[in-house]
């Protein structure tokens, strides 16, 4: 399969780049429950290129996830808007039955548990809160006019639209999940549905950044971009799962959230307290649990047997407990 895919990619790249292409390295990278990522070293008419091939893997965590063509368009807009992202190199369309695109391959570390635990990333951890605020300010400043395909665009309340979509995804699982249903009910009465509307990354967290010795080198994984409330992106990296067991450091296991929020305020003029972010942290916990359940269903149904997908089912159980804990602590109130 990999040799056939390599040959098909080589042909697509030749068309895209306008000349003969030779692929010297082609390797599947670990991770990614909904997308494949392949490291590609290619000799091209423009010279040697280190590329990353992003290709569909047959499953969608959320029903409102972008297609790869749409994701590539968002990446183009982010690159043009000064967000620190890999340079998009081109949408390839169908590549052996699945959509794909290529972008610059950025060097660094993206595995969350390594970033929060390894001593060699201590300096990066110190720099990351301010860098994250800077990138989020740039993302939230993107013009949504050319991104009319984003989920939530054209609706009176993108946040309410997103909650309704999430509710429908839970209902489609066809089984009772009382903790999540209670969480959704709580959110319907506690989320501020008339807030600001900005382009949201949708998965802005440790684990979706390429990080080098000096900190953030690239913002990755744009498939959940949507029009929404800026507080969605601010609270998402505080969700417990993205702390990678360093729970006392609320911002992704690397720091407290104060510097991150203060820097975002300085750059955007938008000031939010931790109390204001609490319902959005609840939203993040509910959203992650529903996404994990949907992925686990792929394994349990026999659609795609995978240990990784099965593990997500266990995490979904943990996150139903997390939703109850947040309710008990008064999160979102």
Image: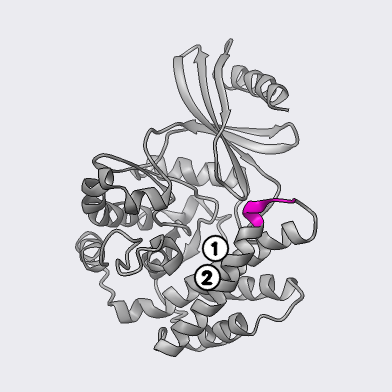
Residue in the picture at 46% in, 24% down: 50
Colour pattern: one colour
Left or right: 134 in relation to 333: left
Q: From the top left corner, tell me how far across and down residue 52 is, in percent.
A: 51, 32
- Residue 158 disc label: 2
Q: Is residue 33 magenta?
A: no
Report the Cα–Cα distance between label 1 and label 2: 7 Å
- In front here: 235 or 239? 239
Give the quadrant of residue 310.
Answer: bottom right
Q: From the top left corner, tell me how far across and down residue 203 is, in percent.
A: 47, 57
State the residue position of label 1.
153
- In front here: 86 or 149? 86
Q: From the top left corner, tell me how far across and down residue 71 is, in percent.
A: 55, 46
- In front here: 124 or 93? 124
Residue in the picture at 59% in, 83% down: 179
Magenta residues span 305-309
Report helix, strand or loop for mark 1.
loop
Q: Is residue 206 visible?
A: yes
- Residue 238 disc label: none
Give the quadrant of residue 271.
Answer: bottom left
N-terminal of the pair, mark 1 or mark 2, is 1
Report helix, strand or loop for mark 2.
helix
């Amino acid at each position: 399969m990999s040799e056939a895919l390599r040959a098909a990619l080589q042909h697509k790249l030749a068309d895209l780049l306008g000349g003969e292409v030779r692929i010297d390295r082609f390797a599947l990278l670990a991770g990614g429950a909904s997308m494949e990522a392949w490291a590609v070293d290619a000799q091209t008419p423009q010279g040697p290129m280190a590329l990353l091939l992003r290709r569909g893997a047959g499953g969608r965590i959320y029903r409102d996830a972008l297609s790869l063509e749409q994701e590539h368009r968002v990446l183009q807009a982010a690159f043009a808007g000064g967000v620190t992202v890999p340079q998009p190199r081109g949408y390839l369309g169908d590549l052996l039955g699945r959509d794909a695109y290529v972008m610059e391959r950025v060097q660094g570390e993206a595995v969350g548990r390594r970033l929060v635990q390894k001593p060699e990333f201590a300096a990066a951890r110190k720099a990351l809160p301010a860098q994250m605020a800077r990138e989020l300010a740039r993302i939230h400043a993107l013009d949504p006019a050319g991104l009319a395909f984003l989920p939530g665009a054209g609706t009176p309340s993108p946040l309410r639209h997103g909650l309704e979509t999430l509710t429908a995804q839970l209902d489609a699982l066809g089984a009772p999940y009382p903790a999540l249903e209670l969480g959704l009910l709580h959110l319907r009465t506690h989320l501020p549905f008339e807030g600001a509307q900005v382009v949201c990354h949708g998965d802005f967290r440790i684990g979706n950044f390429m990080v080098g010795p000096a900190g953030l080198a690239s913002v990755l994984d744009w498939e959940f971009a949507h029009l929404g409330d800026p507080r969605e992106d601010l609270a998402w990296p505080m969700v417990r799962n993205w702390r990678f067991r360093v729970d006392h450091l609320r911002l992704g296991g690397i720091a407290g959230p104060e510097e991150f929020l203060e820097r975002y305020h300085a750059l955007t003029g938008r000031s939010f307290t931790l109390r204001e972010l609490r319902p959005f942290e609840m939203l993040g916990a509910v959203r992650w649990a529903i996404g994990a359940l949907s992925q686990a269903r792929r394994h349990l149904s026999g659609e795609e047997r995978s240990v990784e997908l099965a593990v997500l089912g266990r995490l979904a159980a943990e996150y139903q407990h997390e939703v109850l804990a947040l309710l008990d602590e008064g999160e979102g109130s």
